[in-house]
Amino acid sequence: MSIVIEQIEYYLPEGILTNDDLAKENPLWEMDKVALKTGVYSRHIAGKEETALDLSVHACEKLFKKTDKEKIDALIYCTQSPDYIMPPNAYLIHKHFNFRENIVAFDINQACSGFIYGLYLAKSLILSGSAASVLIINADTYSKYIHKNDRSTRALFGDGASATLISSSDSCKGIIDSLISSCGKEYQSFYIPAGGCRMPFETADKKVKEDENGNSRTDLDIYMNGMGVLSFFRNKVSVQIKELLKKHDLVVEDIDLFVFHQASKVALDSIAAALKIKQEKIYSNIKNIGNIVSASIPVALKCAMQENRIGQGHKIIISGFGVGLSWGSILIEL
């Protein structure tokens, strides 16, 4: 028995924020230079009253036009921007679509590695016999956590959602192997200091502070040490992928396409250089979508399929990395 990605659908909110829009708001940001590093020229932004759940409902509606939701045995909802502190979004989506009761449903609080972690969990559930089909939802509205004057995050992140159906198959192909890693000691490289129980909202410092690069934020907004995170993952991700390739007697040239988390252009270029991957073997759709956190990889996979960049018989490696810090890579044969 093998585990396969049966279907992927996604939804991006209608609101679009372009670099021209940001330049008008912030004339000193030099958006042309920013775009060269981020690779982002526009991003989809959720409306004021629009949540990750709303985005995921649209993605699931598209998915359920192609597959029967009654065959789903488990629901994994990955988000860091849930509608409520409790209950998890998995139960809100369960209510919305009136799923049957005898399925397991839970949230995972992962970010840019969330799709990799979700696949890892889905494969485990299926191989254990606990499920035959698993729905993974990845949805986030990071825009709601970003200070309007923080160039480092506002120019990079967009909002979006994906819905992916994972199933068992008699094929010998599918999800071949995965490597998952964690480094909790680096958690402050990418986090929101306040708003949780450690530093509740009412006790948080809401004063706007400006860093040495001119980025402004409060303790209730995302803090990202961009260069520190980039340096960390450039080394860690390349080492992990080399290990995955070696484990299966493969080299970079044997892989038809690499689909990385769409972190930024400089991040993708850096990892490609470390692994000596030719640009034509790396898929990127960050230009008009931005970094959409855990939905980044499944959306990129779907786009690559639609553009005929991958097909039957191809070997691909997907790799996600982000908050935690966490990172993971998966080898798939279609």
Image: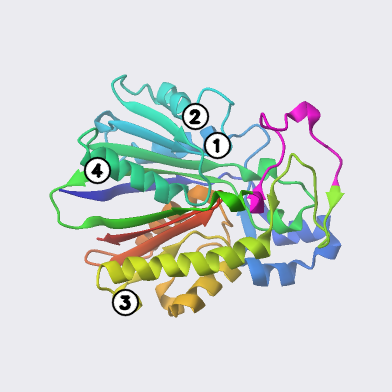
In this image, 190 relative to 320: left or right?
A: right
Q: Earlier in the sequence, mark 3 or mark 2?
A: 2
The span from disc 1 to disc 3 (Cα, nearest Å) is 38 Å
Label 1 with label 4: CB-CB less than 8 Å: no
Mark 3 → mark 2, Cα distance in angstroms: 40 Å
Label 1–label 3 contact, CB within 8 A: no
> To which residue does mark 3 refer?
251
User: In percent of the image, x 74 and y 61: which residue is there?
Assistant: 20
Tell which circle, 1 or 4, labels the residue nearer the N-terminal end. 1
Q: Which mark is residue 210?
A: none
Residue behind mark 1:
52
Q: Is the residue marked by circle 4 packed among few (<14), some (14-19), or many (20+) residues within 10 Å? A: many
Res. 89 mark? 2
Report x, y in % for residue 280.
42, 77
Q: Which residue is under mark 4?
A: 167
Q: Secondary structure at mark 1?
A: helix
